[in-house]
Amino acid sequence: MSGLIIDRARCVGCGRCISACPAGALVLEEGTALVDRGLCTLCARCVDSCPVGAIAVERGSAGAADGWRGVWVFAQQEGGRPLPVALELLSRGRQLADALGEPLCAVAAGGGEGLTRPLLEQGADLVYLCPALSGDHRAEPAWPELLARLTAEHRPAVLLFGATPFGRSLAPRLAARLGTGLTADCTELDIDPDSRCLLQTRPAFGGNLMATIVCPDHRPQMATVRPGVLPVSPPCPRPGARVVRVEPPALPAPLTRVLGEWTADPSAAGLAGAEVIVTVGRGIGVRKNLALARRLAGLLGARLGCSRPLVEAGWLPYDHQVGQTGVSVAPKLLLAFGVSGAVQHLAGIAGAEHIIAVNTDPEAPIFSVAHEAVVGDCVEILREMIGILEEKTK
Amino acid sequence: MRIAVCLKQVPSTNEVRLDPETHTILRDGRQSVVNPFDAHALEEAVRLKESLGGHVTAISMGIPAAETLLRDAVARGADEGVLLTDRAFAGADTLATSYTLAAGLRKAGPFDLILCGKMAVDGDTAQIGPELAQQLGLPHLTEVCEITPVGEGRARVRRLTQRGGQEVEVTLPAVLTLVREINTPRMPTLAGVRRGEAASIVRWGLAELGVDESRCGLKGSPTQVVRTFVPVRARETAFLSGDARSQAEQLLKIAGEVLA
């Protein structure tokens, strides 16, 4: 079990650890330091401050699962409302919690009704709300402090984050601090009925393989989950569900300071959240055919993306690149023209709900993931589609 | 300014071979390249050194053959290469990797700035940067697209967020993970290649780092891969017939239905 260990035989009672502790968890008693495990967040500042090496952090070991209960979801918000991925996590989290016979909790910050009501409706038994903190990336340094404290106090078995840029920055920081495992960018979560462990499944090696990962001997079991993949269940409010307000963490002098923010240029690719995407690949032949893809995208209200060769050729900027090393997309509809479908590219479109592909090569791998396919010249099909749509608008 | 760059050797193709028992990647050094994201981190370190003066240390945890990668880093402008290599480091997940890397950085440092690529293309976790920062007790920022040191132990950093971007002032030392937009990596010069070939690469194992073996490699990894499987593509693809005009009409009809 994780916890702070003080060797009282070695402690000289100098009190340096007490001034180093940001949580006020250490006191001097009978000339030696004593830790209040309820307040200790395992930040290890005291370990570094001790001149005689009397303090250590004991990490989890066998039997570590004992006493850790419940499924927790970090409910990231924007503009006072939970992000869709928070509701996706709560939906799956409800199923996981039911399988374990344990509670489901959401952790949120900022807020008000607009934030907590959807979380309760989505099946949370408990919402830990820290009103004094902003629930997005502006409060980045404070979040590991808060979550480490709540984790030490309440010992959840499972801790889930959306794989947003914020979640993917916060979760690893916290995992390293807690000395536990973290699985990145999962697309499926389940409970193993025998071991009661969280089964965390994610694409590996460019989507060639799926890997199922467990964290058997450390708690909490932590995962980030790709947005837009898990379905949202119908509302299922729990009887007796409630909101518990928590205090913000005491922070040492901040080491990062936000000077300003800007919103993305709307003319930039904007692929990540797009509902309709037209992608083009080498099969469009010559650069001037890009204009056709742009035109069709305009007529369909779609964003334009591409496969890697077009970025490497300098035809489109990097923010248009869809794939493992570019943007991962999750549109309702994706139309791929002249894209062969290299594994790296397929990994990036795995979240697309419906895929239409046009390619001259009947063996192109893109067809293995397409719902509808046309074996033919994509430039010709582009022209025809534009023609039909332009006739309609006349 | 003392800068460290973390580099990872990755397979050049996606046809990786797995250990049948541990399900971890078998790394034999064949057809390996530097992780593309890390090439941008190295370039940024060298550019900062060129404009401000300083020293760039390239560091990697990997098999002995990863030495090639560090020679290449010297060829592209790094001043030294440090390879953390030991059988005990094999099979590490992100927690064990960040623990070992942190020990290497402490021994090779101190550094003002530690730069990493946003993620590695073989693992795709993007976790090493933040975990490393936590292990070192330093602040971190992800998705960084511009770095401007402003003196007095601070840097001004621009980073990408979901909404757009942010300008953040960070106290150094700090760990930054970089996006590929930040720069275009250079090719090594002939003189650089010679320097790389002549460079002596520092090699540290378990004993030299003085790390706790139980926190390294497979032993120190809380996560275990229990199963790998080929994703089922149960999808029945409908191939549309007819001439181009009628195929286009069918596609637009389907598009309309999907979006209705």
Image: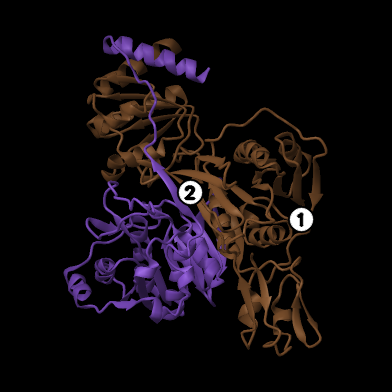
Q: Residues within 10 Å of mark 1 (few under 14, many from 20)?
A: some
Chain of residue at mark 1: A
Question: In the rendered view, does A276 fall on the left or right side of A33?
Answer: left
Image height check: is A368 above or below B116? above
Residue A119, x across and y down, in percent: 71, 39
Q: Nearer the viewer, mark 1 or mark 2?
A: 2
Q: State the image quarter where residue A54 is shown.
A: bottom right
The one nearer the camera, A99 or B42, is A99
* Distance Cα–Cα, label 1 vs label 2: 36 Å
Q: Residue at coordinates 42% horizontally, 45% vertically from top-left? A: B227
Of residue A194 and residue B198, the one placed in the foreground of this image is A194
**Above or below, A366 relative to B172:** above
Residue B80 occupies quadrant: bottom left
- What percent of the width, then of the height, locates residue A276? 46, 28
Q: Is residue B167 visible?
A: yes
In the rendered view, would you say A233 is above or below B64? above
Among the two numbered marks 1 and 2 on one chain, the one whose residue lies closer to the N terminus: 1
Q: Residue furthest front?
A: A194
User: What colour scheme governs how the chains and residues are painted in the rendered image of this protein?
Assistant: by chain
Residue B224 placed where, x, y %? 46, 54
Residue A132's disc number: 1
Instruction: From the rendered image, report the letter of the chain displayed in brown.
Output: A
Image colour for chain B is purple
**Residue type indicated by callout 1:** Ala
Task: Name the residue located 61 percent from the left edge and 53 percent from the top edge.
Answer: A137
> Label 2: chain?
A
Residue matched to label 2: A213
